[in-house]
Amino acid sequence: MSPENNIVELRGLRKAFGKKVILDGLDLDVPRGESTVIIGGSGTGKSVLLKHMIGLLRPDAGSVKVDGVELSTLDNRELTRFRSRFGMAFQEGALFDSMTVAKNVAFPLVRLGLGSEKERAKRVEECLALVRLEDAGAKLPSQLSGGMRRRVGFARAIAHRPEVLLFDEPTTGLDPVTKDVIDELIVELKETLGATVVTITHDMESVFKIADWIGMLHGGVIVARAAPGEFRSLTDPRVREFLGRTVGAHQTH
Ligand SMILES: Nc1ncnc2c1ncn2[C@@H]1O[C@H](COP(=O)(O)OP(=O)(O)OP(=O)(O)O)[C@@H](O)[C@H]1O
Ligand SMILES: [Mg+2]
């Protein structure tokens, strides 16, 4: 694949916290308009990796290129403007506790000055309906369950129709029906809006539903990256072990 087809290119990415090396010379290509899923054990650095893609974390070494732009060359203002092209739903939700759900979802629209108040309200309603939370707009995050908060974070990430979407475990803790709704939304965002999507998930059923590419993070690098069909038949023992533990446990039908 030629470089211009990759919206994100990571090269030799290195990140340590204190003496603990998390990313150790990681390379990854994220093709434009496709869905990339990152899998890997807990604590391997998946969330850390995602945060590097939007400059929320800076690498100790290596390069993060987005659309050909090296993020390390951007100052804070440029970085803020650049981030408006992204929508990110954080693993921990990261909602504003003192704002209603509707205000949380409207936040990126207000910050970017998009639409009139009426148009924003309509878009908020739309996004909340997409995640099946049409009645939650007036509530505070503290009045919601964890799974509901996660869906509010998802609605907020998509509100401004960004071209790149980053979802950190969007379906964790959701019931199977709601989980399907989110998985289908991810595919739809890609197919109807042409968005590039990067998702982290532990749920192998979701992985095979939503991924065009699966990348496995292990030991600070992407040890395998392949399309789903090929990924299933990889012989790398680290992949086999991961699939054996997770896929086997879910294949009940
Ligand atoms: N800001 C930080 N300061 C110090 N250590 C951090 C920081 N962020 C992450 N870490 C450490 O980096 C490692 C990787 O964390 P990360 O959250 O990326 O894991 P993960 O793969 O997303 O795990 P999980 O599947 O449990 O979400 C962990 O050991 C974590 O404690
Ligand atoms: Mg994580």
Image: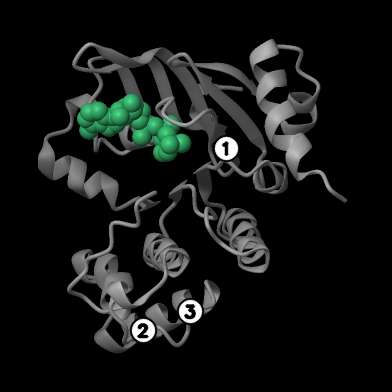
Mark 2–mark 1 contact, CB under 8 Å?
Answer: no
Quadrant hosting ligand 2: top left
Q: Identify residue type, mark 1.
A: Thr
Q: Nearer the viewer, mark 3 or mark 1?
A: 3
User: Which residue is farthest left?
Assistant: 76
Q: CA distance from mark 3 to mark 2?
A: 8 Å
User: What is the CA distance from the residue labelled 2 to the residue labelled 1?
Assistant: 31 Å
Q: Quadrant of the N terminus?
A: top right
Q: Residue at x 52, y 46 (%)?
A: 197
Q: Which residue is mark 2?
A: 137
Residue 206 located left or right of residue 143: right
Residue 136, relative to residue 13: is it above or below?
below
Res 66 seen here: no
- SS at badge 3: loop
Q: Marks 3 and 1, Cα distance to the nearest angstrom? A: 26 Å
Disc 1: which residue:
36
Q: Do callouts 3 and 2 mark residues in contact (Cβ within 8 Å)?
A: yes
- Place residue 57 in its image quadrant: top left
Q: Is residue 28 left or right of residue 56?
A: right
Mark 2: which amino acid? Gly
Q: In the image, 127: left or right of 160?
A: right
Query: Mark 3 or mark 1: which comes first in sequence?
Result: 1
